[in-house]
Image (cartoon, helix red, strand yellow):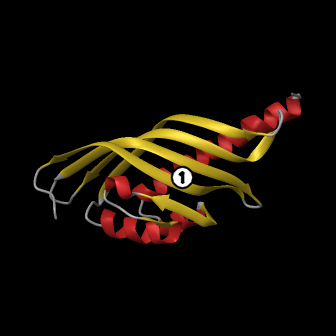
Amino acid sequence: MTQRVDLATVMDRLAIDDLVTRYAVAVDDADWDGYRALFTPDGRVDYRDSGGIEAPAAAGADWLAKAMGTFPVRQHLIVNRRLRLQDLGGYPGDGADVQADYLAVLRTDTGEELSSGGRYAIAAVRTDDGWRLNGVVSREKWRRAAGALPG
């Protein structure tokens, strides 16, 4: 592998890491237009494991906006990222898979709190506009509620 390929691989890894971070920030900040812009036109999400939907990313944004509306305080951390770039015989391809753990803490105006943790399976693809999400699957491993939460 040449230094040029090594540098391209590092740049791809940084761009994908930034993409995953922008996903978390968009959810926390209720930036649903920004959330939608992170995905390819055919991008999909699967939040069924935590009581959500499996749908195109735009519909996922609509569902999240409604579900998160109860929780004006949100912090969503995505950690332990394991990234695998597509390998084309020693050269990076245009696809990547990320496995990453998450911790989400949500709080209502009255102080009730919902915490959960799990793992994301994320598919990213290189597009003319840079790296974009093509699929996000959330697998919740645990959930804890403190106080009476809205139904």
The image shows residue 13, relative to residue 64, as above or below, that is above
Answer left or right for 10 relative to 151. Answer: right
Q: Residues within 10 Å of mark 1 (few under 14, many from 20)?
A: some
Which residue is at the front of the view, 72 or 94? 94
The picture quadrant where one finds residue 50 is bottom left
x then y, percent, for residue 26: 48, 58
Q: Quadrant of the N terminus?
A: top right
- Which residue: 47% across, 36% down? 79
x then y, percent, for residue 82: 56, 34
The image shows residue 119, relative to residue 127, as above or below, that is above
Identify the amino acid type marked 1. Arg
x then y, percent, for residue 36: 54, 66
Number of numbered discs overlaid on the protein picture: 1
x then y, percent, for residue 141: 33, 41
Which residue is at the front of the view, 109 or 14? 14
The image shows residue 81, relative to residue 27, as above or below, that is above
Q: Quadrant of the C terminus?
A: bottom left
Which residue is tagged 1? 22
